[in-house]
C-alpha cells in the first residue's frame, strides 16, 4: 500500500496514512510515496534496469518462442514470463524480443525490452542484454524519457567483462552527461579508468566525486590505492588522513535536532536502514530520548515490517508522552496491516479521542470497516474524514462504500467531489464505473478517458474503458477499441484478474471461445490461486466441450466455493450459473442463500438512508381494499429487449384482463430499439423506464404506485434487482420459473411459480423439512405448465406450412435422409461427457442413424468430432448446423425424428421449439428444476408414453428401441404434431388466465391476514402451498 510517511519535526505533524487494501477502486496515494498501484512492469521478478549504447555482435541462433506467430504481444510476452519462472531464460528472452517487435505502444516496447535484457543478463548472455538496453534507450529517447542513473551504472561492468573497454568508458561518459551531479557515477567511472591503468584520468574523476560528496569512504580507499600503485606513498597517506578526518567529523558534531532531520530525510526518501541509524544515534544525544524519536523509529520499523519493534517504539513514545495521539495511530496501522482489526480500531479510536479533528485517523477507521465488509460503519467515518479534510482520498473511499451499499447516486456525488478536490485517476475510474451502473454510459466513457489521460499507467481505468466500449453496451464503441483497452490494462498489470475476465468475455461475445480460453489459461499461469480465474476457466472449457480433468475440476470447484462462502461475502459463481453446473443441489441452494444474505444487508442500509434507522415502506394502507378496484401487478425486468425472455412473454401483456388487473412494467435496461421492446411498451398499460434509477429509488417508485403483487422477471439472471425485492416495496412478491429456475435463497420472494412436474412437492419441500428444503419459497403451482411461450402466435405458420422436407434440408446435410435423425440444438455447455458417450452408444446401435447438433460454438465441434472418432464412428454421422433465426430453426428442426434432451440442464426454449416443430423429446428428469423442464413440457401431450425415463441407461435403451422401430417413432411424431394447437403448453391466453387466477389468490390471501407480520422471515400465509386448477 502507498502511505504518507514522516515523523515529528518541530511540532509539524507528519503522520502516516494507512490506506485500504480493497482493490483498485480505493485511493492509495501519498506525497513522496513510492508508486505501488498499476505497474508498467511485466512481472514481480523484475529489478531495476540498465541502458547502454549500441553494440553489434554475431552469435548462435537463439531458440524460438513456443507460441504461434499470430499471437499478440501480450500472449507472447506472458509466455516469456512463464518460461522465466520455469528457469528457461534463453527461450524467455526470445519471447520478450518477439513481444517487443509486435507491440504497438512505446511503453509496451520498453517493458518487453527490459524483460529481454533481464533474461539475457541472468542467462549470462551479455551481448543480448547490451543490444536490448540500447534499443530500449532509443525508444525512451524518442518519447523524452531520461534513463535512471542506477540503470546506466549497470552497463559498464558488463562491457568490461566483454573486453569492450572503450565502450565502457563511453557508457560512463554518457551516464555523467545525463546525470552531471551524480557523485557515484563519477566515482565508478574513476574506478573503471583506474582498472584500465588510466591513472591521471581516474584521479580526476575520483576527486570530482569527492567534491560532490565528501563522505564516500570507498573513493578515498580507491584513490589511496591508486597513489600506492604509482609509488606516491606520501599522496596515498594524505588521502588516508583526509578519510580519517571525515570519519571523525561525520557525526560527532551533529546535534540531536540535526540527526533528527537527517533521519527524517532518509525516512521520507525510503532509506529506512539509514534513517534508523540516525534516529538511534539521536537517542544518545542531549534531549534525544523523547517521544518524537521513538515515534519515528516506530515508523521506520513499520516500513521495514519489523512489527514487534514498531509496536515497542510506539509504546516507548507513549511512555514519554501518553497523550501523543500519533503513536496510537501508528499502533493502529501495525494491527490493521496484520489484519488484527479489533486492536486496530481500539487504537484508532484512542487517537480520535485525543484528537477529534484527526481526519486521517477517521479515514483509517473507515478503511478498516471496509476490509471487514462493514460498509455501513465505513460510510460514517469516511464521511467524517471528508468533512474535516475535504481530501480527494476520503471522498473516493466514501464513494466505494456507498456504491457497495447500492447507493450509486450518492457514490457518484462523492466521486465528483473527489475529482473537484484533486483529479486522481482512481476518482475518474470509480466515477465512470458508477455512471455505467445507472446507464449513463456516454458520460462514463468521457470520464474514463479523462482518467487514463491523467495517468497512462492506470490499469483499472483502461479496464473500465474497455467495458464501456464493448459493442454489447450500445455506446458506439467497437470490439477493437474495447480489446485494446483491456490489453493495455493487462500490459500495465498482467495479473489484473478483472481485466482478464473482461477480455475473455469480450472474446466470447465475438464467438472467439478458444481465444478467450487461451487468455484465461495464460492468466492462470501467472496466478493459479484466484478462484475467479478457475471458475471462468472451467466455464469456458464446458462451452467448447473440453472435458479434460472433468471430475478433478468438479471436485476442486465445489471445494473452492465452500471455502469462499466461509471467508468472503463475494462468490466467483453466480446462482444462475450454479444451477447449470454439475454440482450438488444443496450447494446451489447455499450459493443462492449467500447472495441473498448480502443483498438483504445492502437493502437495509439503502432503506435507512432514505427513511431513517429501521425504516421500511408502508404497505398497511393496502389492506383497506375496495373489491371493485383492479389489482395492481408490477413486472420488474432488465430483459424487455432483444432477449429470449421477451421472445417467450411478448404477448403476456396483450392477453392480461385489463378490467381486473392494472399492469405496470418497470424496464431496468435502456431501450434497445428492438421489436420486442416496442411491442411490450405499447401493450403494457404503464411502461416505466427506470434504468437510470438507483435501487432504493426504484423501490420507492414501486411503493408510490401502490403495487399489490410485484413479479420478478429476472431472479439471479443478469440485471436482476435482488436488493429492490429485499426492500419489500410491495405486499406480495413472486418469481416465475420462466425467468430463473432456482430458489432465491432468502425471504424477499413469497412464491415461486412452477408446476407439479417441474418442481414436485417432495423436491421443493413445501411441507417444510428444515435444511433439506431446496426452495426457500413456497410453490405456486400452475395447473399445466409453468412455462409461458408465444409459439402459437409468433409461429403459427410453421404448422400451416409443415416442416421442411428432408429433401430440402439435405442440400447441406445429405445424410439427413438417413433412417433416423436424432437432434439436439442446445449449446455445447449443456452437454456432459457421460451424456455424449450415451449419444454415441445410441448412434452405434441404430444402423444408418445420425446425430444432428448445433454448431455453437464452432470451436467445440472439433473436440466433439475427436471424441466421435475415438469411438470409431464415421465422421459424417455427426452433423452440425450453424445458428439461424427462430423461424428457420423451427422449419429445419421438423426434419428430425427424435430430440435427445440434455439432462442436467434441459433444453428450455429448445424443448418447446422441438415440440412445436413436431419432434418428440426424450428426457431423464433430475432433481433440480432445470433438469425437469422437458418432462414438464412433454407431459402435456397425451398418449405419448416413455418420453420421460428415470435413468440414463433407460434413456439410451429407449432411444435405440425407437430408432430401430421406425413405425413407432413415426406414430409418436404424428401424435405430437396433431396435439400442438390443443395442448395447454402452447395456449398463451389460457396460461395468462390461469396466472391471473394465481395473482388473485395470492392477493386475497394477503388481505385475509389479520395484521402485517414484522417481516417475511417465518412465513406469511401467502407463502402457503397453493395449487391452481383451470
Image (cartoon, rainbow, N blue to C red):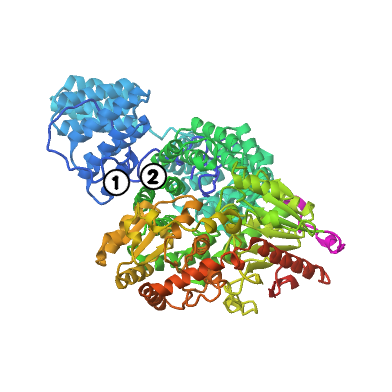
Q: State whether residue 816 is above or below residue 933.
A: above
Read off the residue under disc 2. Answer: 494
Quarter of the C terminus within the rendering = bottom right
Identify the residue at image location x=44%, y=56%: 804
Residue 486 lies, with reference to residue 539, above or below; the image says: above
- The residue under the point 21% across, 25% down is 54
The disc at residue 79 is 1
Q: Considering depth in this image, is 811 or 779 the residue closer to the camera?
A: 811
Q: How many marks?
A: 2
Percent position of residue 382, x then y = 64, 46
At label 2, counting other C-alpha atoms closer than 10 Å, the crowd grade (few under 14, some 14-19, many 20 or more) is many
Q: Quadrant of residue 724?
A: bottom right
Q: How far apart are the alpha carbons under marks 1 and 2?
A: 12 Å
Residue 804 vs residue 299, the one in the foreground: 804
Q: Which residue is drawn at 46% across and 40% down?
A: 459
For label 1, the crowd category at 10 Å Cα-Cα, with few meaning under 14, some 14 to 19 and many 20 or more, is many
Q: Where is residue 482 in the image (x, y as percent from the top left)?
A: 46, 38
Residue 219 seen anywhere in this rendered image of the structure: no
Give how far across and how far down residue 227 sits, in percent: 17, 25
- Asked whether disc 1 touches disc 2, contact meaning CB atoms under 8 Å apart, the reply is no
Q: In this view, does 736 lie above or below 73?
A: below
Query: Most prominent secondary structure in the magenta stretch?
Result: loop
Tell me the element at label 1.
helix
- 642 on left or right of 144: right
In the image shown, does 370 or 735 lie closer to the viewer? Answer: 735
Tell me: 205 left or right of 1007: left
Horizontal and vertical percent for residue 870? Answer: 25, 65
What span is colored magenta in the figure? 608-629
Amino acid at each position: 500500500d502507498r502511505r504518507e510517511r514522516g515523523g515529528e519535526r518541530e511540532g509539524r505533524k507528519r503522520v502516516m496514512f494507512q490506506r485500504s487494501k480493497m482493490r483498485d477502486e480505493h485511493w492509495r496515494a501519498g506525497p513522496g510515496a513510492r508508486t505501488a498501484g498499476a505497474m508498467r512492469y511485466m512481472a514481480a521478478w523484475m529489478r531495476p534496469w540498465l541502458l547502454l549504447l549500441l553494440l553489434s555482435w554475431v552469435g548462435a541462433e537463439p531458440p524460438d518462442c513456443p507460441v504461434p506467430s499470430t499471437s499478440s504481444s501480450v500472449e507472447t510476452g506472458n509466455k516469456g514470463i512463464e518460461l522465466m519462472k520455469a528457469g528457461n531464460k534463453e527461450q524467455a528472452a526470445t519471447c520478450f524480443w518477439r513481444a517487443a517487435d509486435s507491440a504497438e505502444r512505446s511503453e509496451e516496447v520498453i517493458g518487453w525490452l527490459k524483460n529481454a535484457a533481464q533474461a539475457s543478463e541472468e542467462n549470462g548472455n551479455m551481448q543480448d542484454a547490451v543490444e536490448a538496453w540500447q534499443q530500449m534507450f532509443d525508444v525512451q529517447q524518442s518519447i523524452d524519457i531520461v534513463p535512471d542513473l542506477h540503470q546506466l551504472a549497470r552497463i559498464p561492468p558488463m562491457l568490461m567483462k566483454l573486453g569492450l573497454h572503450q565502450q565502457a568508458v563511453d557508457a560512463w561518459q554518457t551516464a555523467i552527461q545525463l546525470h552531471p551531479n551524480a557523485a557515484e557515477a563519477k566515482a565508478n567511472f574513476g574506478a573503471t579508468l583506474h582498472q584500465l591503468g588510466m591513472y591521471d584520468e581516474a584521479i580526476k574523476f575520483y576527486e570530482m566525486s569527492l567534491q560532490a560528496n565528501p563522505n564516500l569512504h570507498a573513493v578515498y580507499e580507491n584513490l589511496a590505492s591508486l597513489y600506492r600503485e604509482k609509488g606516491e606513498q606520501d599522496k596515498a597517506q594524505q588521502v588516508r588522513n583526509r578519510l580519517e578526518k571525515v570519519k571523525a567529523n561525520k557525526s560527532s558534531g551533529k546535534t540531536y535536532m540535526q540527526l533528527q532531520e537527517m533521519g527524517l530525510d532518509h525516512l521520507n526518501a525510503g532509506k529506512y536502514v539509514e534513517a534508523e541509524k540516525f534516529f538511534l544515534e539521536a537517542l544518545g544525544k542531549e534531549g534525544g530520548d523523547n517521544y518524537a524519536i521513538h515515534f519515528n523509529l516506530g515508523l521506520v520499523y513499520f516500513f521495514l515490517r519489523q512489527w514487534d519493534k514498531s509496536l515497542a517504539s510506539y509504546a516507548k513514545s507513549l511512555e514519554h508522552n501518553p497523550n501523543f495521539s500519533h503513536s496510537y495511530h501508528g499502533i493502529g496501522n501495525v494491527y490493521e496491516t496484520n489484519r488484527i482489526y479489533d486492536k486496530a480500531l481500539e487504537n484508532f479510536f484512542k487517537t480520535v479521542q485525543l484528537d477529534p479533528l484527526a481526519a486521517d485517523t477517521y479515514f483509517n477507521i473507515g478503511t478498516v470497516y471496509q476490509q471487514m465488509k462493514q460498509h455501513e460503519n465505513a460510510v460514517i467515518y469516511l464521511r467524517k474524514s471528508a468533512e474535516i479534510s475535504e481530501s480527494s482520498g476520503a471522498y473516493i473511499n466514501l464513494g466505494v462504500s456507498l456504491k457497495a451499499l447500492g447507493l450509486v447516486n450518492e457514490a457518484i456525488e462523492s466521486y465528483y467531489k473527489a475529482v473537484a478536490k484533486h483529479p486522481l485517476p482512481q476518482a475518474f475510474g470509480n466515477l465512470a464505473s458508477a455512471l455505467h451502473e445507472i446507464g449513463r454510459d456516454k458520460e462514463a466513457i468521457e470520464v474514463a478517458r479523462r482518467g487514463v489521460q491523467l495517468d497512462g499507467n492506470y490499469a483499472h481505468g483502461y479496464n473500465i474503458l474497455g467495458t464501456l466500449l464493448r459493442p454489447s453496451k450500445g455506446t458506439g464503441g467497437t470490439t477493437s477499441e474495447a480489446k485494446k483497452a483491456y490489453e493495455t490494462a493487462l500490459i500495465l498489470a498482467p495479473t489484473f484478474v478483472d481485466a482478464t475476465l473482461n477480455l475473455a468475455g469480450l472474446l466470447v461475445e465475438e464467438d472467439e471461445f478458444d481465444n478467450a480460453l487461451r487468455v484465461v489459461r495464460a492468466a492462470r499461469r501467472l496466478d493459479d490461486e484466484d478462484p475467479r480465474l478457475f471458475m471462468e476457466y472451467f466455464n469456458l472449457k464446458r462451452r467448447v466441450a473440453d472435458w479434460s480433468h472433468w471430475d478433478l475440476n468438479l471436485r476442486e470447484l465445489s471445494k473452492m466455493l465452500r471455502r469462499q462462502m466461509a471467508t468472503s461475502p463475494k462468490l466467483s459463481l453466480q446462482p444462475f450459473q450454479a444451477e447449470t453446473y454439475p454440482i450438488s443441489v444443496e450447494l446451489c441452494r447455499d450459493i443462492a442463500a449467500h447472495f441473498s444474505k448480502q443483498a438483504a444487508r445492502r437493502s437495509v442500509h439503502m432503506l435507512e438512508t432514505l427513511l431513517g434507522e429501521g425504516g421500511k415502506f408502508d404497505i398497511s394502507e393496502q389492506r383497506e381494499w375496495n373489491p371493485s378496484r383492479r389489482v395492481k401487478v408490477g413486472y420488474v425486468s432488465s430483459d424487455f429487449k432483444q432477449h429470449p425472455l421477451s421472445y417467450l412473454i411478448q404477448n403476456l401483456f396483450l392477453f392480461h384482463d385489463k378490467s381486473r388487473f392494472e399492469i405496470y412494467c418497470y424496464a431496468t435496461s435502456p431501450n434497445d430499439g428492438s421489436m420486442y421492446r416496442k411491442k411490450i411498451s405499447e401493450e403494457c398499460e404503464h411502461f416505466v423506464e427506470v434504468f437510470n434509477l438507483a435501487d432504493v429509488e426504484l423501490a420507492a417508485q414501486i411503493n408510490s404506485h401502490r403495487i399489490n403483487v410485484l413479479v420478478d422477471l429476472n431472479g439471479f439472471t443478469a440485471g436482476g434487482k435482488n436488493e429492490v425485492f429485499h426492500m419489500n416495496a410491495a405486499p406480495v412478491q413472486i418469481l416465475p420459473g420462466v425467468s430463473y429456475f432456482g430458489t432465491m435463497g432468502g425471504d424477499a420472494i413469497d412464491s415461486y411459480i412452477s408446476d407439479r412436474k417441474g418442481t414436485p412437492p417432495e423436491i421443493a419441500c413445501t411441507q417444510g423439512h428444515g435444511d433439506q428444503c431446496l426452495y426457500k419459497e413456497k410453490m405456486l403451482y400452475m395447473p399445466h405448465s409453468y412455462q409461458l411461450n408465444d409459439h402459437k402466435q409468433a409461429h403459427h405458420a410453421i404448422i400451416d406450412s409443415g416442416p421442411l422436407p428432408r429433401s430440402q434440408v439435405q442440400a447441406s446435410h445429405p445424410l439427413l435422409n438417413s433412417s433416423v435423425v436424432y437432434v439436439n440444438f442446445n449449446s455445447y455447455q449443456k452437454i456432459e461427457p457421460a451424456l455424449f458417450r450415451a449419444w454415441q452408444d445410441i448412434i452405434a446401435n441404430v444402423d444408418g442413424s445420425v446425430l444432428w447438433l448445433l454448431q455453437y460454438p464452432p470451436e467445440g465441434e472439433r473436440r466433439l468430432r475427436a471424441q466421435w472418432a475415438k469411438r470409431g464412428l464415421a465422421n459424417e454421422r455427426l452433423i452440425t448446423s450453424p445458428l439461424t433465426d427462430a423461424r428457420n430453426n423451427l422449419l429445419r428442426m421438423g426434419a428430425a425424428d427424435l430430440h435427445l434432451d440434455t439432462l442436467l440442464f434441459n433444453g428450455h426454449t429448445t424443448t418447446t421449439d422441438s415440440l412445436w416443430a413436431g419432434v418428440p423429446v426424450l428426457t431423464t428428469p433430475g432433481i433440480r428444476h432445470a433438469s425437469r423442464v422437458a418432462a414438464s413440457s412433454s407431459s402435456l401431450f397425451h398418449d405419448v408414453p416413455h418420453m420421460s425415463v428415470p435413468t440414463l441407461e433407460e434413456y439410451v435403451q429407449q432411444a435405440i428401441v425407437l430408432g430401430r422401430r421406425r413405425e413407432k417413432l413415426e406414430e409418436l411424431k404424428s401424435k405430437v404434431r396433431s396435439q400442438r394447437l390443443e395442448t395447454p403448453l402452447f395456449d398463451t391466453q389460457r396460461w395468462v388466465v390461469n396466472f391471473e387466477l394465481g395473482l388473485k389468490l395470492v392477493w386475497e390471501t394477503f388481505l385475509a391476514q389479520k395484521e402485517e407480520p414484522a417481516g417475511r422471515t417465518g412465513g406469511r400465509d401467502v407463502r402457503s402451498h397453493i395449487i391452481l386448477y383451470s
